Image (cartoon, helix red, strand yellow):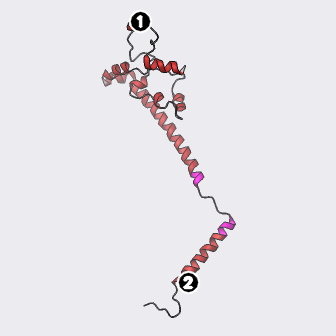
């Protein structure tokens, strides 16, 4: 099934038809329901996040079974439209909303991972025995430092 979809995308849906039938096919329009509206606007999140951890995030925010065609001819039709006409369709706004949701999901996942890393890298509290040993070493270091600063017999500061 995946291979069939890939062939359809590469060679077109009418790849199995004889050439004489392919010529008579109706021209696709960018507004046809089988055309990916996100691709028309310049980026298809489904294609970008395919086979990544974020692929499930994309499918969580779009309708189930979203399997649209990314057609370059339709993209050229879309690109030829003036911006005012594009705004009427709302495809760019829909893409913006989807991308904002995906960014929010990534930020949420990043914050969760950073919390986990910070917890794993946080210093473990010392036990009472360890703290006592550290206090002994600190006192010993301080005493030796003071002793090294004191002039010895017969030495004088000039």
Which mark is first along the chain, 1 or 2? 1
Please tell me which residue lies in front, 148 or 38: 148
Q: Toward which corner of the image does residue 135 lie, by quadrant? A: bottom right
Q: Are marks 2 and 1 in contact (CB under 8 Å)?
A: no
Single out the residue that lies furthest toward the bottom.
154
Q: Is residue 122 magenta?
A: yes
Density class for disc 2 (Cα within 10 Å; few <14, some 14-19, many ≥20) is few
In the rendered image, residue 96, in percent from the top left (x then y), is placed at 42, 31
Q: Toward which corner of the image does residue 75 lie, by quadrant? A: top left
Which secondary structure lies at badge 2?
helix
What residue do we see at 53% from left, 32% from top?
57
Question: Separation of disc 2 and disc 1 at Cα?
Answer: 101 Å
In the rendered image, residue 89, in percent from the top left (x then y), is placed at 39, 21
- Residue topped by disc 1: 21
Q: Does residue 116 lie above or below 30 as drawn?
A: below
Q: Would residue 136 appear left or right of 109 to someone viewing this image?
A: right
What residue do we see at 68% from left, 63% from top?
127
Q: Toward which corner of the image does residue 138 lie, by quadrant? A: bottom right
What residue do we see at 49% from left, 37% from top?
104
In the rendered image, residue 146, in percent from the top left (x then y), is placed at 54, 82
Q: Would residue 71 appear left or right of 152 to someone viewing this image?
A: left
Mark carried by residue 57: none
- Residue topped by disc 2: 147
In the image, the segment drawn in magenta is 118-132
What residue do we see at 46% from left, 28% from top?
47
Q: Quadrant of the N terminus?
A: top right
Which secondary structure lies at badge 1?
helix
Q: Is residue 137 magenta?
A: no
């Amino acid at each position: 099934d995946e291979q069939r979809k890939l062939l359809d995308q590469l060679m077109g849906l009418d790849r199995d038809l004889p050439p004489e039938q392919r010529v008579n096919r109706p021209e696709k329009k960018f507004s046809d329901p089988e055309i990916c509206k996100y691709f028309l606007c310049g980026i298809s999140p489904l294609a970008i996040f395919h086979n990544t951890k974020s692929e499930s995030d994309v499918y969580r925010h779009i309708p189930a079974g979203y399997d649209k065609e990314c057609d370059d001819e339709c993209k050229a039709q879309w690109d030829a439209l003036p911006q005012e006409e594009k705004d009427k369709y709302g495809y760019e706004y829909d893409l913006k909303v989807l991308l904002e949701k995906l960014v929010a999901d990534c930020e949420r996942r990043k914050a969760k991972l950073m919390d986990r890393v910070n917890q794993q890298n946080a210093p473990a509290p010392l036990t009472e025995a360890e703290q006592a040993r550290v206090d002994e070493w600190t006192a010993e270091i301080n005493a030796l430092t003071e002793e090294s600063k004191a002039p010895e017999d017969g030495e004088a500061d000039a």
